[in-house]
Image: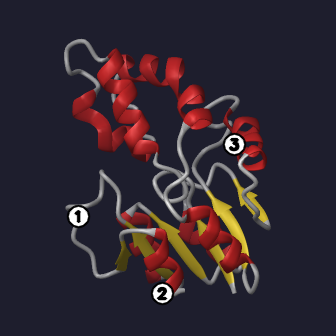
Amino acid sequence: MRIGIDIDDVLVDTSKLMKEYIIKFDNNGDIADHMEEIMRGDIPNSIISRFIDNNIINIIDQVQIKPNAKEALERLNKNNKIVFVTSRGEERFKGSENITLNYLKRNNIKYDGIIFNAFDKAKICKDNNIDVLVDDSVKLCEEAEKEGIRSIVFTSIVNKDRKTNVKRVDNWLELEKII
C-alpha cells in the first residue's frame, strides 16, 4: 500500500512551534488571529507575510517530531511505501525543500518519496497511486475521499473543532492501528 503523509501537523508539531514564534514576535495580536490561515499556507496580509518570511525556515528546521511518529513510520514502512505529500516547497517558501530534506535525513526518517508544492492533494494522490492520505486538513481529506482515496484526518490545533465524516486520529499509535 502507498501511504501519503503530510508533514506539518502530522509528522511534526508545526502549529505548536508556530504558536511559540507568534507569541514571541506578535506585539499586538495581528498574527495570532490568523493561525489557521497561516497553517493552511494562506497569507492574508503584509504583516503575516513578513512574519512568515522572517521565521518559516527556522520553524521548519526546529520543529519537533510528534510522539511515536518515527517508530510508527518505521513499522509502517516495512510493508508499505511512505510518500510525504506536503505543501512545503519553493513556490511558497524559498529554501524549504532543502531544509525539509536535511531535516528528514538528520532525524533519520525513512520514506520512499516526497512530493513538494502539493496543493491539490486529491489529484496528486490519484496521479501517484496513493492508497491512503493522512493529512491535518479536513478539506483536503474530504476532497481525496471524493476521488476514492481513503483519507485520515490527523487532529491538530487548527482542525480539532472541525466536523467531518472522514476518519480522525489523535496520534501516531492510533494511525498505525487503523492503517
Q: Nearer the viewer, mark 1 or mark 2?
A: 2
Report which residue position mark 2 lands on. Answer: 178
Picture quarter containing residue 131? bottom right
Q: Which residue is mark 1?
A: 162
Sequence-wise first label, 1 or 2: 1
Can residue 14 be spotted in the picture?
A: yes
Who is closer to the viewer here, 108 or 179? 108
Mark 1 → mark 3, Cα distance in angstroms: 28 Å
Label 1 crowd (10 A; few <14 / some 14-19 / many >=20): few
Q: Which residue is mark 3?
A: 100
Whole-percent x, y for residue 11 in the image: 55, 57
Q: What percent of the width, then of the height, locates residue 66?
A: 50, 56
Left or right: 36 with respect to 174?
left
Between the C-alphas of marks 1 and 2, the distance is 21 Å
- The residues tagged by marks 2 and 3 sit, at their Cα atoms, a distance apart of 27 Å
Q: Nearer the viewer, residue 132 or 154?
A: 154
Q: Are marks 1 and 2 in contact (CB under 8 Å)?
A: no
Q: Nearer the viewer, mark 2 or mark 3?
A: 2
Q: Amino acid at mark 3?
A: Thr
Q: Residue 164's spot in the image, x, y percent?
A: 27, 75
Nearer the N terminus, badge 1 or badge 3?
3
At label 2, the amino acid type is Ile
The residue drawn where x is 35% and y is 64% is 155
- Say which of 113 and 75 sits in front: 75
Q: Earlier in the sequence, mark 2 or mark 3?
A: 3
Q: Quadrant of the N terminus?
A: bottom right
SS at badge 1: loop
**CA neighbours of label 2 inside 10 A, class few (<14), some (14 to 19), many (20+):** few
* Residue 51, quarter of the rendered image: top left
Q: Are marks 2 and 3 in contact (CB under 8 Å)?
A: no
Identify which amino acid the numbered label 1 is placed on: Arg
Q: Which mark is residue 177?
A: none
